Amino acid sequence: MEILSTRNLKVSLDNREVLRGVNFSIREGEKVFITGPNGAGKTTFLETLMGFVEIEEGVVFYRGKELKKEKDFKILRGKVGYVFQNPDDQLFAPTVEEELAFAPLIKGLKRERVKEIVERTLKLFSIENLRDKPTYKLSGGEKRIVSVACVLTMEPELILLDEPTAGLDSERWKLLKKFFESTEVSLLVVTHDRELLDSLNWPVFKMENGALSQVR
Ligand SMILES: Nc1ncnc2c1ncn2[C@@H]1O[C@H](COP(=O)(O)OP(=O)(O)OP(=O)(O)O)[C@@H](O)[C@H]1O
Ligand SMILES: [Mg+2]
């Protein structure tokens, strides 16, 4: 079953065409990379999938349903996680633990269940020591891994990740790669990380000047 797809997606920013007719689809359990040069439109593409950017032409489908208005994207945002390229755009809670608890609490899960999810996620990325830290006091790499972790706690069916390995040390890098390999969640990973691209045998798409094509 297809989760998310686009047909002939066109987006302009400041009267410049940034996405020039993108066709893409990702199914349940599928994991893919998008790579491509700076300014090619990768982040804009992810933002458009989340409904943060106005669509000029073309369509985004979520499970076969066409999403048109801003409010149509609300269903998708409860099911599709988004890890921002800049963690400062994403993190907002006073502490790491509260950041991780936010999504499951909003879902209405019981305190005990929320606690379980938070503990499991802290352990998964070996960040138990960061539990009580204010998010604004984290280092760059710590922010990065916390921003991945807090999207996981919403238990999404698909996660869009924008440069998730940027700034990670080798221990965290390995934990993240292990998660990528073992999870059943669908993943769309935007990355420049050559080692990551080479070490996971996933399809690779290249965004170039606003056009997307499969290169592996
Ligand atoms: N808010 C905005 N207003 C106007 N132009 C923008 C805006 N955001 C991005 N752009 C432009 O859109 C183009 C694509 O930017 P985008 O951030 O999608 O690239 P990217 O592929 O993610 O690059 P990088 O690898 O550097 O993250 C760039 O030319 C950029 O200058
Ligand atoms: Mg980008």
Image (cartoon, helix red, strand yellow):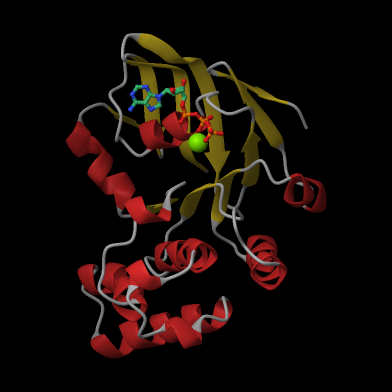
Camera-nearest residue between 87 and 82: 87
Residue at (40%, 70%) from the top-left corner? 153
Camera-nearest residue between 1 and 205: 205
Q: Is residue 205 above or below residue 161?
A: above
Q: Image check: 94 left or right of 139?
A: left
Residue at (32%, 82%) from the top-left corner? 114
Q: Looking at the rendering, in which quadrant would you find the C terminus?
A: top right
Whether residue 64 is visible, yes or no, is no
Q: Image check: 196 left or right of 130?
A: right
Instruction: Estimate the x, y position of residue 84 in percent, counting from the top left.
Output: 42, 49
Instruction: Estimate the x, y position of residue 149 in percent, counting from the top left.
Output: 47, 68
Instruction: Estimate the x, y position of residue 35 in percent, counting from the top left.
Output: 65, 34
Whether residue 70 is visible, yes or no, is yes
Q: Is residue 3 above or below residue 145?
A: above
Q: Would you identify the image quadrant in which residue 192 lies?
A: top right
Total numbered labels placed on residues in the image: 0
Residue at (55%, 23%) from the top-left corner? 40
Camera-nearest residue between 156 and 38: 38
Residue at (47%, 34%) from the top-left corner? 43
The residue at the far bottom in this view is 112
Instruction: Estimate the x, y position of residue 51 in percent, counting from the top left.
Output: 30, 35
Camera-nearest residue between 73 and 98: 98
Q: Is residue 125 above or below residue 145?
A: below
Q: Image check: 91 left or right of 72?
A: right
